[in-house]
Image (spheres, rainbow, N blue to C red):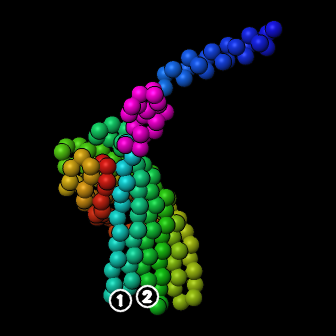
């Protein structure tokens, strides 16, 4: 008897809950689909690519994906990869990044980014590996609209780890879609 009542209660609960779904209405969608759509609509993508030739080959790739917390504030993750090399010397960095980006004014951006940089250097048959943290803070300019555009930034490492081979400030240019 108790099992029958529990089963009946569950059945009625499911039926009542399913009434919240408006699949039967032309153009209607469920709450789950609306929430998924709202989540997807708040995602933004971007990053940068760099390539240079000369005495050294230079390659930079840094894709990013973020989530707009508000219309003016977003946070996300990315990966940064750099390669500089020729026949005698190779230098590679790789690092996962966490960032927060804010639109201070119409086209002015502020960014705070933390990354752990892993370095591999090869010179005259020897390999050196080390890593260091970096916390980049800076300001930038974005040309485009609310759907994104091209940006340039000037960033400074507030940690200034002595292992860091980078020259500061860092100049970065890239694109953003959805922020």
Q: In this view of the protein, can residue 21 be seen by the observer?
A: yes
Residue 177 occupies quadrant: bottom left
Front in this rendered view, residue 51 or 171 = 51
Task: Kindly identify which residue carries mark 1.
Answer: 55
Task: Kindly identify which residue carries mark 2.
Answer: 86
Residue at image location 49% in from the left, 58% down from the top: 96
Residue at image location 48% in from the left, 82% down from the top: 90
Magenta segment includes 34: yes
Residue at image location 49% in from the left, 66% down from the top: 94
Magenta segment includes 1: no
Q: Looking at the image, is mark 1 or mark 2 earlier in the sequence?
A: 1
Residue 41, image x, y percentages: 37, 43
Q: Marks 2 and 1: in contact by CB < 8 Å?
A: yes
Front in this rendered view, residue 81 or 39 = 39
In the rendered structure, which segment of residues is drawn in magenta? 22-41
Front in this rendered view, residue 153 or 17 = 17
Q: Look at the numbered disc 2 and give the secondary structure of its residue.
A: loop
Question: Are there few (<14), some (14-19), or many (20+) residues within 10 Å of tag 2?
Answer: few
Which mark, residue 167?
none
């Amino acid at each position: 008897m108790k099992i029958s009542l529990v089963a009946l209660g569950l059945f009625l609960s499911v039926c009542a809950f399913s009434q919240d779904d408006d699949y039967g209405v032309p153009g209607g969608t469920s709450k789950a689909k609306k929430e998924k759509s709202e989540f997807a609509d708040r995602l933004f993508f971007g990053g940068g690519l760099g390539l240079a030739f000369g005495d050294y080959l230079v390659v930079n790739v840094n894709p990013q994906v973020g989530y707009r917390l508000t219309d003016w504030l977003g946070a996300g993750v990315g990966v940064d990869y750099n390669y500089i090399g020729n026949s005698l010397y190779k230098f590679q960095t790789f690092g996962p990044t966490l960032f927060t980006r804010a639109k201070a004014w119409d086209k002015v951006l502020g960014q705070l980014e933390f990354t752990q940089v892993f370095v591999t250097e090869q010179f005259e048959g020897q390999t050196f590996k080390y890593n260091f943290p970096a916390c980049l803070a800076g300001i930038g300019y974005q040309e485009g609209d609310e759907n994104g555009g091209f940006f340039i930034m000037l960033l400074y490492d507030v940690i200034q780890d002595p292992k860091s081979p980078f020259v500061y400030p860092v100049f970065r240019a890239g694109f953003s879609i959805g922020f």
